[in-house]
Amino acid sequence: MEIVSLSKSVPEMAINGDEPPPPPYVFNKQSIFGSIDVSPPYGPFPVIDISLFSPPSSSADVHNELEKLRSALISPGCVQVIGHGISSSFLDKVSELGKQFFELPMEEKQKYARPTNQVEGYGSNMIVSENQVLDWSDRLSLSVFPEDTRNLHYWPQNPSGFREMLNEYAKKVKSVEQTLYKAIAKSLNLEENSFLKMIGERAPVRARFNFYPRCSRPDLVLGVKPHSDTGGITILLQDKDVEGLQVRIDGNWFKIAIIPDALVINLGDQMQIMSNGIFKSPLHRVVTNPEKLRMSVAVVSEAEVDKEIGAVDELVNEERPRLYKNVKNFGAVVYESYQKEQIALDTITA
């Protein structure tokens, strides 16, 4: 890859939006994941009210909502949730402070720059291969749990209140995550802590602020190329105004609608492994926009790196044998596959 092609950051290139995107950002139209369609139809992503999973909901309401959740996670593996208890005003604050960070001068953002070959901090693409297609995005990735793993050196002090906001948001989303892990287990008639026990008490949770500048050629360039997530559950706060997230179902791409104050939930590969393939980790991508910037906040939970994960015993039987090998540090497998446009789960089939 020519160094000159990376001489400018994505935000710097977006300022000169009439210039054609450099070749490393151009998505291969012959990709196994299909060409870019910036406006496919809306997909079948149901809305789940997770407040029903807490007392004093009736047993009938709980049963119906669990059944709806189970069905959606079998396919397409993605839902939107309401009733999560996070106020609209606070969600607006999270988005606003995130946007304010990305609007800072580059020299200010570079104070929190991600070191080479590390995930945490501010930056764009990590280059791992010459043939890698680059994402048209900027990111700020921060470890939020366990709390003693937080590296505050990368937590922005500018804009004011960012650290306090992230601390509060992380705790609120952690509660949502716990509710979901338990509900997902119950939907399969498992003990509610089945998945929580497998990922471990010190399961790492990372917050990632994603910034997608406008792009002159959305037909050629993706904000994030197709991938499935590494962990168990991803909880996404979408941009309030600009669509962009798409999920692949049966070989076709569908866009996810913006529902005010809803959080998008998609499962990761580790949940597909733990559920023995009953639930799906959907392929998804982000398209670019020629007129508007977009920002989202993803909170991703994974199993402890040293914990071996595999199918929950109750989900393995003669009719449904074990589909995947037990694995440790699955994140390393996923990352390498992501850059090579491979599907990580295919590399660990039993």
Image: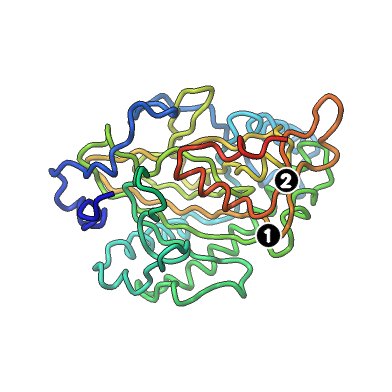
Distance CA(mark 2)–CA(mark 1)? 26 Å
The amino acid pointed to by label 1 is Glu
Name which residue lies at 86% across and 31% down: 317
Q: Which percent across, then down, holds residue 91?
A: 47, 56
- Is tag 2's residue or tag 1's residue first in the polypeptide sequence? 2
Residue 158, how many percent across, how many down? 35, 74
Image coords of residue 183 (percent x, y) = 73, 44
**Residue 340, percent across and down?**
45, 41
Occupied quadrant, residue 154: bottom left
Q: How many marks?
A: 2
Please state if 98 lies on the left or on the right of 26 as rendered. Answer: right
Residue located at (43% from left, 32% from top): 255
Q: Nearer the viewer, residue 39 or 64?
A: 39
Residue drawn at point x = 69 percent, y = 65 percent: 202
Is there CB contact under 8 Å for labels 2 and 1?
Answer: no
Left or right: 333 in relation to 105: right
Q: Residue at x 85, y 38 (%)?
A: 314
Q: Amino acid at mark 2?
A: Phe
Image position of 110 (left or right of 86) = left
6 lies above or below 215: below
Residue linked to disc 2: 53
Residue under pointer 1? 304
Label 2 crowd bin: few (<14), some (14–19), many (20+), radius 10 Å: many
**332 and 33: which is toward the camera:** 332
Q: Nearer the viewer, mark 2 or mark 1?
A: 1
Circle 1: element type: loop
Secondary element at tag 2:
helix
Give the crowd class for mark 1: few <14, some 14-19, many >=20 residues within 10 Å. Answer: many
